[in-house]
Amino acid sequence: MLILHDPRCADYGSSMRPEQPARVLRSAVHLKTAHPAWTWQVPDAPVAESALLAAHTPAMIKRMAVPPDIDGDTPHFPHIADHARRGVSAALQAASRALAGQKVFSLMRPPGHHATRTQAMGFCYLNQIAIAALDAAKSGRRVAVWDFDAHHGNGTEDILAGQPNLLFSSVHQFPGYPGTGTESFANCHNFPVAPHTPRAAHLAELAGSWEVVVDFKPDLVLVSAGFDAYSGDPITAMTLEREDFAELGRWLRQAGLPAAAILEGGYSPDLGWLIDDFISAWDN
């Protein structure tokens, strides 16, 4: 297993916010201790401006880099544009390595799946998974994005909707932030789950969303791996347990498709264990 991680992704933010540096700091310590044989690499591939512009408008990219705060969930931080670009670099490298036969997890922040074509929002500044999907698909590959974060990946949907050779499949809490994802259309498949839905019913929706991905026969699967559907997450009302994330990893392994996963949400102190359960089941 290859873990893409740049320690600088913890150099911004506040412990007063759910999306905080400790998310990746604690997770990195846990994973390195539990799996000393896994390979760690700092993503350093340059990001072409054309890759960003395939997903975002010039005005949106410019606005991300300057004060004031974009919204209450998406503050301006010094050098946030650099942090976001490093996340994009990791996602692009993850996709490339997956296509070469490796299993890859990108342990980076900020997350990205709420960033739309024109608007940074919801802790997200650039939509790295959408950028990577567009880049991988430009040569004619079929690319599926599977999003099991507890929040709808509205930005990924906005960017990928109607795009050839691309599919988006999302399971998410509704009602819940950002209030989208209630219907499926074109190449976008949504599976809304009510708060406090029993685990078995939630897992059945996840199975349906994964079946859509497999039926698409993708050349590459990119996973928006958010772990905030966990029962212990402080900002959602969902019921999954650690073994359920392991089950998602087993589905990836059993499908045998080239795949890379990108960290999105997950705000519990147990995040490192949840990532571990998912990756270990995928890797074994």
Image: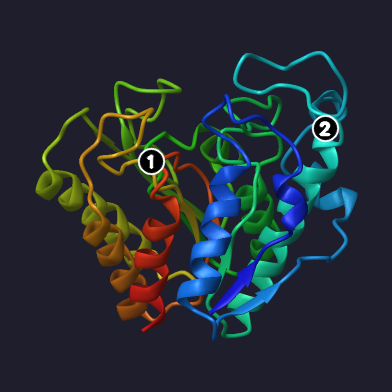
Q: How is the image coloured?
A: rainbow
Q: Residue beneath label 2, please?
A: 61
What residue sits 33% from the left and 29% below the top? 236
Tell me if 201 is positioned left or right of 63 in this view: left
The percent position of residue 99, horizontal first and vertical second, equals: 61, 78
Count of marks, rendered view: 2
Q: Quadrant of residue 172?
A: top left
Whether residue 220 is situated above or below residue 79 in the rendered picture? below
* Front residue of this view, candidates 180 and 17: 17
Q: Quadrant of residue 72?
A: top right
CA neighbours of label 1 inside 10 A, class few (<14), some (14 to 19), many (20+):
many
Tell me if 51 is positioned left or right of 40 in this view: right
Name the mark on residue 228. Answer: 1
Q: Are marks 2 and 1 in contact (CB under 8 Å)?
A: no
Can you see residue 55?
Answer: yes
CA neighbours of label 2 inside 10 A, class few (<14), some (14 to 19), many (20+):
many
The percent position of residue 6, horizontal first and vertical second, equals: 73, 59
What residue sits 83% from the left and 65% below the top? 44
Whether residue 283 is situated above or below residue 31 in the rendered picture? below
**Mark 2, secondary structure of its residue:** helix
What residue sits 59% from the left and 31% below the top? 15
The percent position of residue 269, horizontal first and vertical second, equals: 42, 44
* Front residue of this view, candidates 26 and 135: 26
First in sequence: mark 2 vs mark 1: 2
Nearer the observer: mark 2 or 1; the answer is: 1
* Front residue of this view, candidates 8 and 153: 8
User: Which amino acid is tagged 1?
Assistant: Asp
User: Which amino acid is tagged 2?
Assistant: Ile
What residue sits 52% from the left and 46% below the top? 264
